[in-house]
């Protein structure tokens, strides 16, 4: 089953996508991730949207794939209608299975403008061992983040 989530985010904010269950028996995997500015035809914009396994205390445009809590990142730029600066989008996401809430952040580099996101998650029924692995990864990620913050 595919579940979709979409939203419009202001600059330097975080959305929470609630996925956790009482027993952790449902897992999710990102299958599609896209972003686009609010008015791509006429405004200049450079937005970075990231998906994390844990809540973020600060939001920026830095993408660091050595961060094991980062599930995906997208960068979209749209400029005033000019042939030399066409719009572009780069999206990279992990195929990791998770069973807890995820957090989407948005940072706009040049101006405080909003950005749209669209995420498709594949819902997966987890057996007991898969559930345990996903939950332990989540606990470890929260512990690592707490120690480094």
Image (spheres, rainbow, N blue to C red):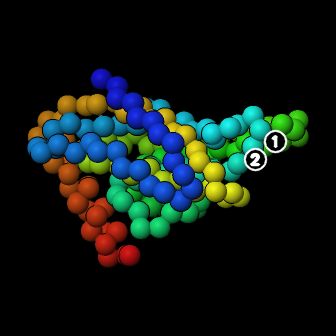
Residue receiving disc 1: 80
Q: Is residue 78 left or right of residue 70?
A: right
Disc 2 residue crowd, few under 14, some 14–19, many 20+, Cα 10 Å: some
* 10 Å crowding of disc 1: few (<14), some (14-19), many (20+): some
Q: Earlier in the sequence, mark 1 or mark 2?
A: 2
Q: Residue at x 54, y 52 (%)?
A: 10
Which quadrant is the N terminus positioned in? top left
Q: Is residue 103 left or right of residue 136?
A: right
Is residue 96 or residue 121 the one in the foreground?
A: 121
Whether residue 1 is visible: yes
x and y percentages locating residue 25 in the rendered image: 15, 38
Does any portion of residue 92 appear in the rendered image? no
Where residue 35 sits in the image (x, y, percent)? 57, 39
Quarter location, residue 41 = top right
Q: Quadrant of the C terminus?
A: bottom left
Q: Is residue 145 left or right of residue 127?
A: right
Q: Residue at x 26, y 55 (%)?
A: 137
Residue denoted by label 2: 44
* Local secondary structure at mark 2: loop
| Along the viewing direction, whichever of 38 and 20 lies nearer the viewer | 38
Q: Secondary structure at mark 1?
A: loop
Q: Is residue 91 above or below residue 61?
A: above
Q: Where does the image place residue 111, in percent across and percent down from the top left?
A: 69, 57
User: Residue 4: where, in percent of width, then height?
Assistant: 39, 30
Q: Is residue 128 left or right of residue 59?
A: left
Q: Label 1, label 2: how many angstroms apart (C-alpha)? A: 5 Å
Whether tag 1 and tag 2 are in contact, CB under 8 A, the answer is: yes
């Amino acid at each position: 089953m595919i579940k979709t989530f979409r939203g419009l985010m202001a600059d330097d904010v975080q959305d929470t996508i609630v996925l956790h269950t009482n027993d952790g028996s449902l897992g999710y995997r990102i299958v599609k991730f896209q972003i686009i500015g609010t008015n791509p035809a006429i405004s200049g914009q450079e937005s970075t949207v990231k998906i994390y396994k844990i809540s973020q205390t600060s939001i920026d445009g830095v993408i660091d794939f050595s961060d094991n809590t980062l599930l995906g990142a997208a960068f979209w730029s749209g400029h005033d209608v000019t042939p030399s600066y066409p719009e572009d989008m780069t999206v990279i996401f992990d195929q990791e299975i998770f069973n807890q809430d995820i957090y989407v952040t948005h940072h706009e580099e040049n101006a405080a403008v909003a950005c749209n996101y669209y995420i498709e998650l594949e819902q997966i029924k987890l057996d007991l061992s898969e559930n345990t692995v996903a939950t332990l990864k989540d606990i470890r990620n929260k512990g690592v983040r707490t120690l480094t913050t």
